[in-house]
Amino acid sequence: MGRSDFQVKIRGLRIELEEIETKILQFPNIEKVVVCVKRDKHGRDFLCAYFVSPERISIPELKKYLTQFLPTYMVPNKFMQLQDLIYTPNGKIDRKSLPEIELEIEKHDIVLASTPTEIKLSKLFEELLGISPISIYDNFFEIGGDSMLALKLQIALLNDNINVTYADIFKFNTISSLAHKIDTSESNENTINYDDYDFSKINKLLSNNTSSSLKNLKKQDLKDIVLTGATGFLGSHVLAEILDNTSSKVYCLLRPDPSIDINTKLLHRLNYYFGNKYDSLINDRIFAISCDITKEDFSLDSGTVKQLTRNVSTVINCAALVKHYGAYENFKGINVTAVKNLVDFCNTYHKKLVHISTLSVSGNMIFDLAAQNRLLDKDILFNETNLYVGQSLENVYVRSKFEAEKLIFENMIEHNLDALVLRIGNVTNRTTDGKFQQNNEENAFANRLKAFIELKCAPNYLRDTYAEFSPVDNIATAILKSIQYVGKINVLHIYNSNHVYLEELIDLLPRKMIEFVEDDIFDKKLKVALSNTDSSTISLLANDFDEHRHLVYDSKIKLKNTFTNSFFDKVGFHWNIINKDYIAKLLKNI
C-alpha cells in the first residue's frame, strides 16, 4: 500500500515513477519534479510530469533526452513547468494540489478528415488517444500513441476487415498517409533495396566460408578484450563465458548514466544473472569504462584509448538496439554509426573485430513474415556465404543490422580489417535454471508462446511449424569457441538447428496447456480474444496474419548453417537438448 503512488501499471506495463523522476532531475536546470498518473475524461491513464526550474525548459529537448534512457512507455505524455511545488505539513509533495492537465492537441493547423477512410481512421484515433479533434497530418506517436495503442489500432482495423501490418502503423503514422495506404492498396514493397549495388566483391569474400577453411583449426590464446553491450542479456553471458574460460581482462564500454556509478550499473546486471559471482573481479579483470560508442573515438581521452590498445587483441560488439519498429534514425546510431566507429578503431590499432549480428538480416524473422513472403515468388537459401539475396530491408532493425554487416565486409576488402561476423538466432532462456532477459515483455518469441498458452489452443495448420530454441549460455559458449578457433572464417550462423516442431513442443509442456483444434474453431477463439481482452500478449498475434487471416511463421527464406555446424563439430561445441526439463524452466521465467 505504501508503494502504490510510486509503482503503477498502465496498459499492462509496470512503471516505476521514481525512476522517471530521477532521469528528469538529471536534465540541466531542473531542480524539482514529480511524476504521476492522470486520467482523462475518456478513462485513459497517462503519465504527467510537473517540474520546477529557474530557466525555461524546452519540452521537446527534455523528451528527446528521456528517450535515451527510458522506454517509450515511460516517457511522460505531458509536461508542465511550475514556479514551485506545494508540500504537505509532513514535508511530502502535495499531489492533490497539482494542476489538472488535459491530454489534447492544439486547435490550430487542424485539417479534418474528408474521405470515408480518413473519417474512419479519425474516429479510431480519437477513441484510442482520447483527444479530439485530430488533424489528418498529426503523427500518431507524437500525440500520445505508443506501441500498445498501435496494436489496438491494428486490431480495430482488422475487425473491420482492413488488414494493415503493425509496421504499417509506424511507417504510415498519420491519418492521411495510412488512409492513402489503405485506399490505394499500397504494399510494403522493398523500397529500401540494394539491387543497384555491386555485391561481387563481398560475395567473393564470403565464398571463403567453405569446408576448405576448416582445415588446421588451432586454438588461439586471447589477450585482453574490449566488450560492448555487457549489460545486455547476451552481452552479460558473453562476459561471464570469457571470465570463466580465459584469463583475459575485459574492458566493458558502457553508456554513461548520471544516476548511477558505472561499476554499480554493470554489477547490478551481473548480479541479476549470476549473483555476486563476479563482484570481486571489478577493477581486477572487469573494467567498466564510461563512453559513447556512437561518437568518434567513443568520446574517450587519449590515455584511456592508449590503455585499450596496449594489451587488447579483440573487440566484441554485443551492443544493439533490438526493437523492430520505430524511426530508422533511432536505430542508426547504435546499430550502424557505432559499428563504423568500432571498425575505425580496429583499423587504426590493428585489432580483431567480432561483430554480433542477427540472422534477421536474411529477411527470415518472426516479424512481418506474411508481408515478407508476399514479396517472394520462390524459396531462397541463405547461408554463411550470403549477404544480399533480394530480401526485404523495409524493417528498420533488419536494415540497420544489414548495413552494419555491409560496412564491415567493405572494410575487410578495402582496408584488410580483421573481422568475424556472428549471426545469432533466437536467444532463449539459460539452460541451467531458465533465467531470461530482464525485459522479457519485449521478447517476441516468448510473447507468442505465452499467447498460445493463454488461448489454450493452436490451429492444426501449425502442427509442422518449428520453433528454434538457442539458449543464451549455449550461444555465449559458441561465440567464445568461434573467436578462439576461427582462423580464416568470416561469417558463422550461430543457432540451434535441432528444431522443435510445435506438435513436439506441446508434448514437452508440463501439462496439456495447448491443444490443437480445427482451423475454424481457432479462428473463432482468436477473434473473440482479440475483441474482448486487453491482453497485449494475444494482440501480438494480429501482426502475424496473412491476407486469409492465417498465422504465418514459415519464411520463404530458408536458413542454413551446415558450414557452422561442421566448424562446431571440429572445435567440440554441441547444443543442449531441448527437453521437458528445459521447457519447464523456460515457462517459469517468461
Image (tube, helix red, strand yellow):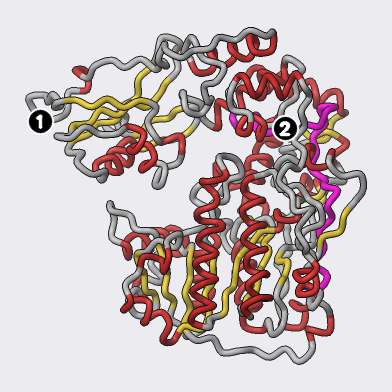
- Tell which tag, 2 or 1, sits nearer the viewer: 1
**Horizontal arrangement in the rendering, residue 334 relative to residue 289 (left or right):** right
Is 564 or 110 nearer to us in this picture? Answer: 110
Residue at the outermost right position: 378
Is 415 or 129 nearer to us in this picture? Answer: 415
Above or below residue 153? Residue 544 is: below
**Horizontal arrangement in the rendering, residue 254 relative to residue 582 (left or right):** left
- Distance between mark 2 and mark 1 Cα atoms: 51 Å
The residue located at (63%, 7%) in the rendering is 114
Above or below residue 208? Residue 61 is: above
Above or below residue 142? Residue 357 is: below
Q: How many marks?
A: 2
Q: Which residue is mark 2?
A: 456
**Horizontal arrangement in the rendering, residue 248 relative to residue 532 (left or right):** left
Amino acid under disc 2: Lys
Q: Residues within 10 Å of mark 1 (few under 14, many from 20)?
A: few
Amino acid under disc 1: Gly
The residue located at (82%, 63%) in the rendering is 560
Bounds of the magenta segment = 536-564
The residue located at (81%, 74%) in the rendering is 207
Give the percent coordinates (x, y) of residue 130. 48, 14
Q: Of helix, strand and loop, which one carries label 2?
A: loop
Q: Which mark is residue 91?
A: 1
Is 485 or 118 nearer to us in this picture? Answer: 118
